[in-house]
Image (cartoon, rainbow, N blue to C red):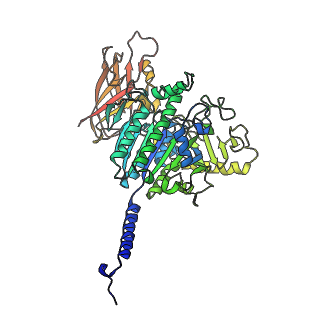
Amino acid sequence: MVKITPENLPARLISILSIFITVLFISAAHARVKPNVVIVLIDNHGYHELSRNGHPVVQTPRIDRLSRTGVNFTDFNAPPFCSPSRGALLTGRYALRYGIHNTVGGVSILHRDEATLADMMKSAGYRTAVFGKWHLGMSHPYTPDCRGFDEYFIHGGGGVSQLEDYYGNNHMDATYIHQGQYVKSRGFSTDVLFDQGIDFMNRNRETPFFCLISTPAVHFPTLLHPEAGKRLKDRGITDEKQLPIWSMIENVDENVGRLLDYLEASGLKENTLFYLMSDQGVNDRGVTHRAGAGTRRGVQYDEKHQVYCMVQYPKITDTQPGDRSELTGMVDVLPTVLDVCGIEPPSNLDGQSMRPLLAQTSGWNGERKLIIQCPRARERSKWGNLSVKYKKWRLVDGKELYDIKDDYGQTRNLIDQYPNLVKALTASYETFWNELPPQSELLSAHVLGAEEAPSVRLSGMDWYEGGHPWPQQALAKRTEQGKWRVDIARSGIYRFELRHHPREEPRPAEAVKASVTVGKHSRSTLLDVGATHAVLELKLEKGLYDLNTVFQHPDDHEGNKEWGAYYVNVDYQGE
């Protein structure tokens, strides 16, 4: 037998073997490269506020191009409010399962027992970051760093200039929270956030990353983007009422294009799963596309659920671009990301992987039913603000049935014509409702005195009883009171700093007395009417309590005599 050595092999065969071995090595290395994930979530942007979907003024050429070169889902549905939608995105579960069904009032906080997409990606070796809007809890342990994100650069609350946001913010030159510290930005919010996101990707391009860019645009308050606004005016657009929102939309389009260009130029595109979505539909906002739009404002109808969703992942979608009409939703994003990244999904998901739809292969369950329910109140209610979706059918509040293929505006109630279908959809909802834990178990308590967060700021946006002030304009009135649910992590002395305005805006509280009550423990103090805040200390034992505060008006004040501190800074002082 002849022994084969490099010396007695023909040169061409050696070359071919070398290439073959190199290809195998590169293929094996390539197989080990985890896909990057980028999700861009635009706030409060309507399905029809894109030029590809019929808007007569707004021009969105980059988003339109993505819808053609990637996969465009035409029946993608999201909860009709900010916090429930973000919760569904990050958990793959229906929002009522973890106690979110509003955007204020103590029920906009993602329960601490819920695992997030960021948690799962981080455990799989990903660098994780979120830029922009959070709106799932601003106190410990609900901040992004407690929910799996290595980096975060966010504004406070659910929108620019809300109570939890830095005082006086608007979309231009805003102050953000970066890794727990306030930092000043330069420029328009959307531009700033995409800059931050691209910088994060560039810094982490050698490692797999998960980047969530969640813009406060195009949620109100609106503000004219200088350059985009000028271009609209140059096109002859003179509608001063609509110009700000249209300029913000066109600026979003520019930034989406800028990010896509970066991914391509950097060589990251081929291995990046890219999602672009809006977080909720909008009722008629100047452009009517549904019969009856502008007259019905119920959040249980499709105009508040249908959002655009476009996906680009060249490894799957280069050969299968175009529209997909299957019923999909926000809860499907997490299982899709995990599927593409090869991460084992939890067993408690409501969503399902959209990967078969991206590749047009088998495996999609076309019989799935999608439940969207947001009671928009502190108390959930059976059948309240409900839509059970199945293919082209919509069961609304258990009383109305619509065929959206023949009746896009949902104007013809067919519930008496399809009793068997109604029975089946009702049974799906009954199963879901009966699985929900008691609402009292889902109330998210603010943890005070944790070793990793000895200082915590609370705001009246999260009162779970009483009022629910949420815009900073509410500070002009001193009327509302409420309670926080708190979890005292360590027994000891706690310092409570009661304020009507936040620390960054130290205006007089205009109160003559202040008090704080935690469970059965209470303390009060007199104030000079010009004092900006009151400081009180209580010795507390570990446990769950209600926290209540009171400011008292001077005796000569007309109307109500008391109101609650809209801001409370709590510091653990030790045993």
Q: Residue furthest bottom?
A: 1
Residue 385 location, x and y as percent?
Answer: 60, 38
The part of the image, by quadrant, that contains residue 458 is top left
The part of the image, by quadrant, that contains residue 498 is top left
Q: Which residue lies furthest to the left in this view?
A: 575
User: Can residue 142 be seen here?
Assistant: no
State left or right for residue 69 relative to residue 154. right
State left or right for residue 347 relative to residue 183. right
Q: Tell me if residue 119 comes above or below residue 499 in the rendering.
A: below
Toward the viewer: 448 or 276?
276
Toward the viewer: 452 or 542?
452
Of the 4 image quadrants, the one containing the C terminus is top left
Residue 60 location, x and y as percent?
Answer: 54, 37
User: Can residue 572 be seen here?
Assistant: yes
Q: Residue furthest right?
A: 417
Of the 4 image quadrants, the one containing the N terminus is bottom left
Toward the viewer: 35 or 547?
35
Q: Tell me if residue 564 comes above or below residue 484 in the rendering.
A: above
